[in-house]
Amino acid sequence: MLLSVVVVVLAACAAYVSGERGVGQAGPGTAPSGQASAGPALRDLMPANIRIGAAVDGRLYASDDRYRSTLVTDFNAVTAENAMKWANLQPEPGRYDWTASDQVVALAQSHGQAVYGHTLVWHSSVPSWLSESWSREQLRSALRHHVRTTVARYRGRVWAWDVVNEVLAEDGKLRDSIWLRKLGPTYIADAFRWAHEADPDARLFVNDYGVEGRSRKADGLFKLVRELRAQGVPVHGVGFQAHLRSNTAPIDATSNLRRFAALGVSVAITELDVRIQLPVSTKKLLDQALLYQHMLKACLAVSTCESFTVWGFTDASSWIASHYPGYGAACIYDSDMKPKPARDALLHELRRRVAPSPR
């Protein structure tokens, strides 16, 4: 089976590098006019119980026809890449600007896409007007108001939230942040309870990177989730960001996801991208494609996996180049909105799942 996957994806890589597409076959959700044929839509082949999503640039979603058409064709869920981060929502004390986040939600609803909220509590993107010199109660009150206000605004319109994001350090202990220093570790449980009060039907996730496979950090996250659940904190799911390098696969990803599922929570791949050290080559594209396929396979193998999200679907708007010098080409569509071998690999895995068993 693995050999057949490699053969299929290698052919896709060779075709892509040579500039020849046609790897996909005509079918439902075919590519928009003027765009390379991508074959069936990913969303059409995804199991009904798993959303397939992409992080979105709200401005491109609203203004770029090719971007929007590809996004709507392939994905039935979106995550606001930046629009829902606290610093963007509340640029001044006492004043919220919902323009960008409302736009993402409205566009998604108009195209039948679910919305995943990102993110309520983070050590980064904290409003500049918020100061660590404030008293503990002032900071706690500000955080409580933000969580409740944001979740309540989108009650019934955002299906899930990253309630706390990247709360762990690399050694698996709680990250040193303004929230930990001033509020202590109870800020995590508080945030989940406040979010649940604001929307009892929303699915609430803890989200982190570097925890996709077995690691000290993953062990720390497992311990945290187990303890929170034992305290009755409404933690419904664990998000595995999966910002990966093409030549480095997570250790035992499927088993790792399963051990979290055994705690009684859902799991989700929340921010998948696979960056390539430039320049791009056929071998690197193959490694990338197989890693995308590997993470989808892990999600599909775990009964509680609710969502599979790529962090941007086109290299044209990817964050990678600005954060990882010398790396790029991390997405499943290139900068010209042409499907890459990574998309073929996802398509192959989904087709394999729905294909009838040989008699």
Image (cartoon, helix red, strand yellow):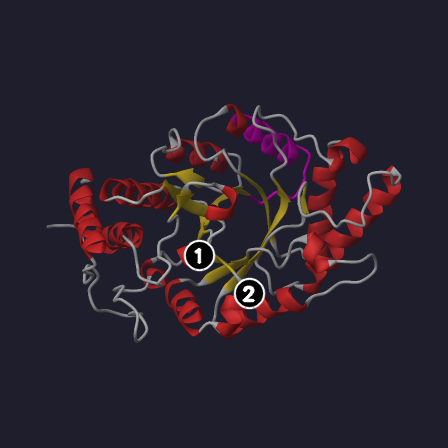
**Image spot of residue 197 (x, y percent):** 73, 53
The secondary structure type at the circle numbered 2 is helix
Identify the residue position indicated by label 2 in the image.
58
The answer to which quarter of the image holds residue 2 is top left
Tell me whether circle 2 and circle 1 mark residues in contact (CB < 8 Å). Answer: no
Q: Is residue 49 visible?
A: no
**Quarter of the image that includes the N terminus:** top left
Q: Which residues are magenta?
A: 219-237
The secondary structure type at the circle numbered 1 is strand
User: How many labels were placed on the picture?
Assistant: 2
Question: Which numbered circle lies on residue 329?
Answer: none
For the residues labelled 2 and 1, the Cα–Cα distance comes to: 19 Å
Residue 96 among magenta residues: no
Residue 236 among magenta residues: yes
Left or right: 52 as drawn, with respect to 322: left
Q: Badge 2 local density, few (<14 within 10 Å), some, or many (20+)? A: many
Residue at (70% x, 59% y) in the render: 89
Q: Is residue 259 visible?
A: yes
Question: Which circle's residue, 2 or 1, is located before the other in the chain?
Answer: 1
**Image spot of residue 263 (x, y percent):** 53, 34
Amino acid at the residue labelled 2:
Gly
In the rendered image, the vertical position of residue 325 relative to residue 47, given as above or below: above
Q: Badge 1 local density, few (<14 within 10 Å), some, or many (20+)? A: many
In the rendered image, the vertical position of residue 212 relative to residue 120, given as above or below: above
Q: Camera-side residue: 277 or 288?
A: 277
Identify the residue position indicated by label 1 in the image.
51
Left or right: 75 as drawn, with respect to 88: left
Q: Camera-side residue: 134 or 30?
A: 134
Q: Main secondary structure of the magenta part?
A: helix
Residue at (21% x, 59% y) in the render: 19
